[in-house]
Image (cartoon, rainbow, N blue to C red):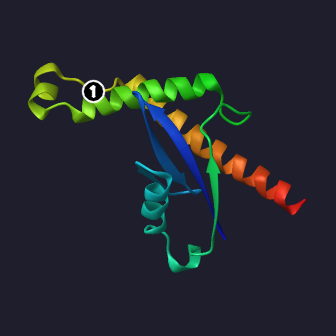
């Protein structure tokens, strides 16, 4: 069985959703859109799924400080990504190697937190 967590993520006065498994991730404007995008990535062996909708709030697995920093770095990354190409070349706007490493570490930590939340919920459901 594949466990899927759906997280609501706040970014720049808007909310989007991420659907996450142990090794796959997708996003969408709605929880359903994120889930549909992720389901399209699953193989037949992964077809049996358990879907968990998680409000994106601090918890014991991923702190408010981590969430805030991840949001800051993702917003910066999006701003750079969405800038016109010539502007990027002219101004050489990219995340620094330190920021990119921090972003990668936070994404990995959030994914691990999602897996831990799922495992904890599974243990709770086993009762």
- Is residue 95 placed above or below 19 in the rendered structure? above
User: 78 or 11: nearer the eye?
Assistant: 11
Q: Residue at x 45, y 64 (%)?
A: 36
Disc 1 is placed on an element classified as loop
Left or right of residue 14: residue 95: left
Location of residue 52 in the rendering, given as x and y in whole percent from the top left corner: 65, 55
In the image, residue 115 above or below residue 76: below
Query: Label 1 crowding class (10 Å Cα cut-off): few <14, some 14-19, many 20+?
Result: some
* 17 or 99: nearer the viewer: 17
Q: Is residue 62 left or right of residue 97?
A: right
Q: Residue at x 50, y 29 (%)?
A: 70
Quarter placement of the C terminus: bottom right
| 115 is higher (above) or lower (below) than 125 | above
Residue 39 at x, y percent in the picture: 48, 67
Q: Circle 1 sits on which residue?
A: 94
Which residue is painted at 35% across and 26% down in the image?
76
Taking the image as shown, residue 40 lies to the left or right of residue 77, namely right
Residue located farthest toward the bottom when viewing the structure as drawn: 44
- Which residue occupies 70% across, 53% down? 118
Query: Where the N terminus falls, by quadrant?
Result: bottom right
Extreme-right residue of the structure: 127
Judge from the rendering whether residue 65 lies leftward or rightward of residue 125; answer left or right.
left
**Dividing the picture into quarters, in which one does residue 64 lie?**
top right
Indicate the position of residue 24 as horizontal and vertical percent values: 50, 57
Residue 43, percent from left and from top = 50, 75
User: Considering only vertical position in the picture, is 9 above or below 79?
Assistant: below
Q: Nearer the viewer, residue 13 or 52?
A: 13
């Amino acid at each position: 069985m594949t466990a899927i967590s759906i997280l609501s993520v706040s970014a720049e006065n808007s909310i989007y959703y991420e659907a996450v498994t142990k090794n796959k991730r997708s996003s969408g404007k709605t929880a359903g859109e994120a889930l549909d995008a992720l389901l399209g990535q699953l193989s037949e062996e992964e077809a049996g799924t358990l879907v968990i909708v998680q409000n994106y709030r601090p918890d014991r697995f991923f702190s408010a400080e981590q969430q805030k920093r991840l949001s800051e770095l993702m917003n910066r990354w999006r701003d750079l990504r969405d800038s016109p190409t010539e502007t990027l070349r002219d101004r050489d706007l990219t995340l620094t190697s330190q920021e990119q490493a921090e972003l990668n570490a936070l994404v990995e930590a959030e994914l691990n937190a999602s897996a831990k939340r799922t495992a904890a919920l599974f243990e709770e459901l086993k009762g």
